[in-house]
Image (cartoon, rainbow, N blue to C red):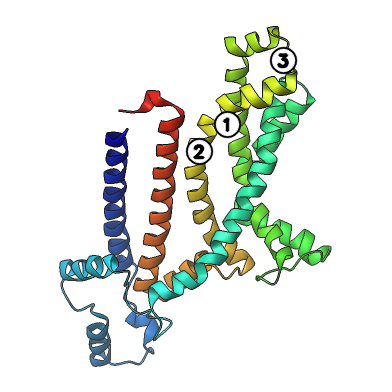
């Protein structure tokens, strides 16, 4: 077990290092930030001086070495757009809003997908199963940003039940959470359904029924417990999708989180903030997958190697 954990931790660090190289390289090919920070009539000398102040006049390997050294200390430099503010400080300030939205979206996804997936498996080829399949079809077909705009137009503009944008109270969580979590509802529901179908055909489930256990106990205690391994491994991917989806949804709803911050940083070619956002997202995503892998190994000893 210790060997398995050590291998997973090593792979996590390698993945994070690869991400750092990718984000550093992609940040440099998006363009010169001096074209955004300086007026159109700026002289070439002014551009050169600004590049020197930002450290962009140094060789690319020197810039990367500085970036890695500072990143280990949690320092991604000062923001280019928000002058005088630390990039990490800006990300940390915006992070709670994104994590709260992701948590609400996760609760919505689990609350809908778990019972619907179980009922679809238990009531196979009935009206309940067909409704579940339709939910899965629409959930995986509708783009999150399009769904967000439709929900905003119906519930915020036409019915005026919730705010159109911003983070003004608990009601402002409804539309963004549903927009992000709807795709996850479909994916998780299909996974729960397929896992339950496989488990419900097992011999020990038949034996439990022969012994006279109630159907509810067979399904919820014996069936769901053994069918939960596959959905558990999917939670790491789900959380990553929530973070990625937050960029478009937070932009649609003007949600003051890290997703909107990433969008604004890309438009401003703010290298330090872009790097901080992607590295933080990657670290959270990799950490979640590491935790899920370890939990999976405890639940199913067959995968330990």
Q: Is residue 46 left or right of residue 180?
A: left
User: Reading the chain from its start, which is encountered first: label 1 or label 3?
Assistant: 1
The residues bearing labels 3 and 2 have C-alpha atoms spaced at a distance of 30 Å
Q: Residue at x 63, y 54 (%)?
A: 104
| Image point (19%, 79%), residue name | 57
- Residue at image location 43% in from the left, 54% down from the top: 284
Tell me: 180 left or right of 289.
right
Q: Is residue 298 above or below residue 212?
A: below
Q: Which residue is mark 1?
A: 191
- The answer to the question of whether label 3 and label 2 lie on touching residues, with beta carbons closer than 8 A, is no
Question: Element at badge 2?
Answer: helix
Q: Quadrant of the N terminus?
A: top left
Q: Regarding mark 1 in the picture, which secondary structure is present there?
A: helix
CA distance separating discs 2 and 1: 9 Å
2 and 1 marks in contact (CB < 8 Å): yes
Q: Does the rendering let one see residue 248? A: no
Q: Quadrant of residue 116?
A: top right
Q: Position of residue 60 (x, y in %)?
A: 18, 68
Q: Is residue 134 visible?
A: yes
Q: Residue 267 location in percent, x, y?
A: 45, 72
Mark 3, secondary structure of its residue: loop
Are the residues flagged by discs 1 and 3 in contact, CB closer than 8 Å?
Answer: no
Seen in the image, is 272 located left or right of residue 146?
A: left
Question: In the image shown, does 230 or 162 lie closer to the viewer?
Answer: 230
Q: Where in the figure is residue 295, as x and y percent of width and height?
A: 44, 37
Q: Does 142 appear above or below 174?
A: above
Figure quadrant of residue 9: top left
| In this view, the mark in front (1 or 3) | 3
- Which residue, given by chain and number where applicable, does mark 2 sit on? 234
Instruction: In the rendered structure, find residue 213 and report the number of the disc placed on it.
Output: 3
Is 139 on the left-hand or right-hand side of 1? right
């Amino acid at each position: 077990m210790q060997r398995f954990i050590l291998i997973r931790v090593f792979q996590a660090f390698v993945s994070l290092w690869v991400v750092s190289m990718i984000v550093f390289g992609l940040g440099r090919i998006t363009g010169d930030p001096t074209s955004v920070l300086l007026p159109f009539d700026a002289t070439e000398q002014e551009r050169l001086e600004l590049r020197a102040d930002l450290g962009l006049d140094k060789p690319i390997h020197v810039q990367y070495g500085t970036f890695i050294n500072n990143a280990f200390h949690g320092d991604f430099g000062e923001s280019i757009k928000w002058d005088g503010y630390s990039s990490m400080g800006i990300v940390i300030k915006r992070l709670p809003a994104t994590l709260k939205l992701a948590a609400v979206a996760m609760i919505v996804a689990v609350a809908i997908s778990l019972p619907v997936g179980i009922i679809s498996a238990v009531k196979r080829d009935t009206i309940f199963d067909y409704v579940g399949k339709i939910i899965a079809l629409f959930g995986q077909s509708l783009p999150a940003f399009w769904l967000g705009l439709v929900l905003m137009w119906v519930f915020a503009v036409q019915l005026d039940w919730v705010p159109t944008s911003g983070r003004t109270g608990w009601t402002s969580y409804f539309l963004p959470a549903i927009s992000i979590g709807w795709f996850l509802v479909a994916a998780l529901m299909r996974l729960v359904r397929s896992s339950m179908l496989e488990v419900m055909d097992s011999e020990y489930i038949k034996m439990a029924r022969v012994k006279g256990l109630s159907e509810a106990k067979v399904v919820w205690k014996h069936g769901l417990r053994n069918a939960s391994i596959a959905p558990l491994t999917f939670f790491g991917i789900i959380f990553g999708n929530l973070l990625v989806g937050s960029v478009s949804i937070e932009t649609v709803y003007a949600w003051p989180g890290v997703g909107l911050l990433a969008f604004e940083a890309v438009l401003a070619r703010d290298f330090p903030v872009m790097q901080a956002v992607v590295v933080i997202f990657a670290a959270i995503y990799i950490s979640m997958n590491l935790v899920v892998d370890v939990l999976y190994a405890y639940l199913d000893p067959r995968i330990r190697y």
